Image (tube, rainbow, N blue to C red):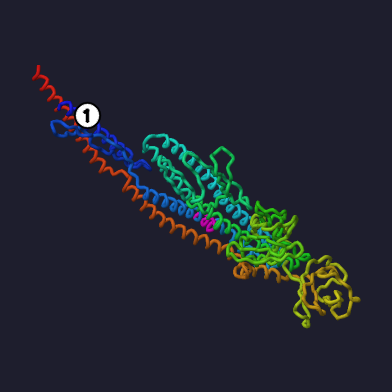
Amino acid sequence: MAVDLLNIARTGVQAAQSQLAVTSNNITNANTEGYHRQVASQSSLDAQSFGGNFYGTGTYVNDVKRIYNDYAVKELRIGQTAVSAAQTRYTKASELDQLYSSAGQATVQGLNDLYASLNSLADSPDDLGLRTNVLSQAEQLASSMSQMHTSLDGQMQQTNDEIVAITERVNAISSEIANINNELMKSTGDNAQLLDAQDNLIKELSEYAQVNVVELDTGAKSVMLGGSVMLVSGEVAMSLSTTLGDPFPGDINILATNDNKGSGDGSRINVDIASLGGTLGALADFRDDVLTPAALELDKMALGISDAFNSLQTQGIDLSGALGQNLFTDINASTMAFGRVGALSDNTGTASLSVNIHDASALTGTEYKLVFTSSASYALTDTNTGETSSLTLNGNTLEGANGFSLDIDSGVLASNDTFMLRPTAGAASGFDVVMSSPAAIASGRPKVTPDEGNSGNTTLTLSSIDDTNAIGFPVTGSELTFSIDLSANTFEVFDVDGVSLGAAASYTPPSISAYGFSFDIDSSATGTERFTFDLSQSAGDNTNLVQMAALSELRLMNGGQDTLTDVYENTKLAIGSETKTAEVGVTAADAVYAQAYDRVQSTSGVNLDEEAANLMRYQQAYSASAKIMTVATEIFDTLYNSLR
């Protein structure tokens, strides 16, 4: 029995030593992120029969288990995805909110300063110093608008850069998981260290996107992103890549390749980034639903300012007596119109389209989708409201949209060709002051008086003052009255005394040029209409300046709902609301994540008090087994000595 005691003692020492090793490893990794507590399972060796009885032969450690709760870990990954998305959403919204609340206010202040300078000039319309100040304030407004556009463009670039960087990191993680899977497939048992590393990588992956994990019998795991993109299949890692947006290059897209990295023969599919969840989904949501609309609203504000001031300028007379010219860049100039139309890459037609804005105040949407299905069907959908309307082709122009039309500049449309439209895009970057002379500010207004007997269905627009020195040019005291026969396309002119200045002359609608000026006619009448013109520049005439200053209170934008300043303030309020909502979302997501984390820790985490108690327990077991060896040795020695 002495030999049996030694064997029993040896197995006890070895088992206690294994238990001490596992416990010590738990203690030393208590603060290791992602470490799962391990437990050594101990069993008895088979008993042996002796003298009609069965005697135990010792113990052994039959397994070292990694304590792992699959359900709790899944909940933790879901919580990680949610909290990463919420934190990203809040961080990005906060940055934009700070921009609109601080630096962006210079844009509103610049517009208010322009209004104030126009009010001052209205008191002394001929003062060149005050006129110079108006131009200076206009230039300051343009500079503020440009700086704001640059800041928003910088945020767009930063957001896209983050998407690219995360995509690269996701690819690196997929390679690492595939390598670990390969090692696990080759190993004969569960390698706790590899499994912990695998779980840590998947948990990190769940920060960037929602993950679905399929466990294999070998311990390897296949991973999908967002429920649709296979990222890792066993030991094979797939690849993601980023590409320029379609149709707008600034909207970075992600492509998934369904083959092993480096093989180059797999198909590539577009990934809906927003559907991935996590940081990637939050970045895409912020870019597409917050940042891009905010930039387009700033563009709309720039268009509104340019359209409103330029329209009033062209209705007034400057110090030289000429018809006023644009103060700001024309709303359809190439620098203001860049990026308004994008054709999808899979269009089969060759048509090239451009957007022409006719009335900035009528613009209500930020982005539209145009689909051509037949020669009589041009469906225009507001992507914000989902409302769809039909456009009408008139020559090469598609008409019927709010505030703008589409020109088919070249090529032909094919069935199902699709275009994305951003009518306001690029306006803030192209917004600038084009007037150079303070004297060119149109302070006064020409007087065009319709006859009381007119139908009321005819309007005249003064298009140019060509020669103020022309014989008969209408000035105060020498006004001219035009009698226009709309059915015969002829006109006759009378002086201030009602005397005809010549026989009726023909004209080509809609324009008439005579006596040093030109005007356009827009009428639905068929009879004769009469208008009296006084185009003199009166000293101190501030009529047009008063109209410009009054723009501060006019609801010109969004179909007559908002002032020019309201466009900015409404965007600022929307961003502030988004930031507050995102802040609440972070609190909620943190609470859910904390619960999931505690659940995992309660199962798989290391409890130092429990491990310290185990350490003492296994130390005593080790000492006791060693004592058995001592006793067995002494018995053997006694027996041996008695037989000598």
Q: Position of residue 571 (x, y in %)?
A: 56, 62
Q: Quadrant of residue 323?
A: bottom right
Q: Position of residue 71 (x, y in %)?
A: 37, 50
Check disc 1 and report the residue beneath it. Answer: 10
Q: Is residue 537 above or below residue 591?
A: below
Q: Is residue 366 left or right of residue 215?
A: right
Residue 431 appears in the picture as rendered: no
Toward the front, the furthest residue is 52
Q: Quadrant of the N terminus?
A: top left
Q: Is residue 290 magenta?
A: no
Q: Residue at x 32, y 43 (%)?
A: 67
- The front one of 124 and 118 is 118
The amino acid pointed to by label 1 is Arg
Q: Position of residue 449 (x, y in %)?
A: 77, 77
Q: Is residue 301 left or right of residue 282?
A: right
Toward the left, the furthest residue is 642
Q: Position of residue 31 (x, y in %)?
A: 34, 41
Q: Quadrant of residue 632?
A: top left
Q: Is residue 98 magenta?
A: yes
Q: Residue at x 26, y 41 (%)?
A: 611
Q: Is residue 547 above or below residue 527?
A: above
Q: Is residue 576 above or below residue 4?
A: below
Label the magenta part by its dominant secondary structure.
Answer: helix
Q: Is residue 82 left or right of residue 273?
A: left
- The front one of 614 and 1 is 1
What is the magenta range?
Answer: 94-102
Say how many tags the image has.
1
Residue 601 appears in the picture as rendered: yes
- The front one of 574 and 328 is 574
Assign a secondary structure to mark 1. Answer: helix
Q: Quadrant of the C terminus?
A: top left
Tell me the crowding category of disc 1: few under 14, some 14 to 19, or many 20 or more residues within 10 angstroms, Cα based: many
